[in-house]
Amino acid sequence: MTGVAIGTLVGGTVSDRFGRRNTLLVALVIATLGSLVSFVLKENWSALISGRFLAGSGSGAALVLCRVALREECDISRQLLVSSYLSLSVALTTITSPLLGNWTFTAFGLRGLLLLNLASSGVVLLIALNGFKETQKIQRGQHGLAHLFSNVGLLLRDPHFLLVTGIVTLAWLIFVLLGASLPTLLQERFKFSRQGYAVSTAFAYLAYFAGIRTSRKILTNIDPYSQLTYATSMLVLMFGIVIFYVTQSEFSAWIFIGMVACIYVLLGLVLPLTQTLVMRDEYSNFGLVASLFYFTELLSGAMALLGFSGLQGDLLIRLVIACLFTATVLFVFSIGLAACARQKNCQRH
């Protein structure tokens, strides 16, 4: 996780200087090299950890660079279309990866698991070599640490960037908390079978996918800032309904899953909308913007899981209260973002 965070922070920033393709290829070479070190020197614990760190760093940089390239290559509607399929693949990967990893480890041991990781890294590198083209349209003339810190300062003083980043961070916290808690709730609290767990999880992620597809229509036809306010207010309302429902003496697990699916639809609206709004045309350094943005998102998710795990009490009640509080702050931020957007429009006119 540390390697992924560092790669996320550095990858986009470096790509503003050296180009998206060159940086991506170097990142994937580092990831493949790290996987190779882990595989060859797996008996050495220090070498194994170092290799996984390198692999995580390269993967984190690649994650940011793909998002930046998508922003530079596609219009908003196309971005959201591609994002919807990316999110669906992430959802499917979330469900299948633990099963595949467990099966591989059981059948072939650590060696087989590391070999699978190395093969995957090599395949991705070959695909990038043959299919990824340079998307950076403007070559910058100023570089160096002074210029970098100046750009960071400008971003950190931009209320639009701060509010959008805050909204995505808070929405991502809700997404992470739900995703981390649902397996335990479904299997231990509600005693779901493996089939019931798979169906309910797939249902929730498909609801998220549906929300993303809806957000594509919103960005092309409706004011996105107003829709963010509406969606976040609905999140607060949904969590209020959920906390009232789960405090009853008896409640249906499937009704709870239906409520969670509605929440995932709203998250599917909020997250893509704000992720698209963060990299506006007035920014010239998309790589730096993406690095700061996704690093904050990743770090906040890890810290939220750490803090949430330290809370005491019933898991379901803790989850709903934490999400209700987060959604309320998210709603306040969305109101501030809408006001900021209106002010900028008035200044332009």
Image (cartoon, rainbow, N blue to C red):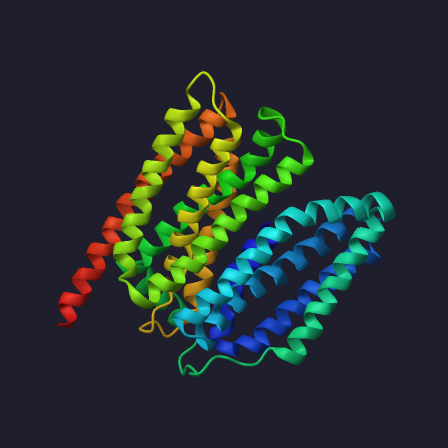
Residue 40: x and y in percent read 83, 58
From this view, report whether residue 276 is shown above or below residue 138.
Answer: above
How many marks the image carries: the answer is 0
Residue 76: image quadrant is bottom left
Residue 305: x and y in percent read 52, 38
From this view, report whether residue 186 is shown above or below residue 130.
Answer: above
From this view, report whether residue 73 is shown above or below residue 4.
Answer: below
Residue occupying image coordinates x 53% and y 75%: 20
Is 202 situated left or right of 275 in this image?
Answer: right
**Nearest the eye: 41 or 190:** 190
Where the C terminus falls, by quadrant? bottom left
Residue occupying image coordinates x 23% and y 55%: 338
Is 223 situated left or right of 196 in this image?
Answer: left
Residue occupying image coordinates x 56% and y 30%: 185
Residue 66: image quadrant is bottom right
Residue 250: x and y in percent read 47, 18
- Residue 287 in view, yes or no: no
Residue sitting at the far top = 249
Residue 329: x and y in percent read 31, 41
From this view, report whether residue 306 is shown above or below residue 52.
Answer: above
Residue occupying image coordinates x 40% and y 83%: 141
- Residue 127 in view, yes or no: yes
**Nearest the eye: 183 or 245:** 245
Residue 187: image quadrant is top right
Is 238 situated left or right of 23 in this image?
Answer: left
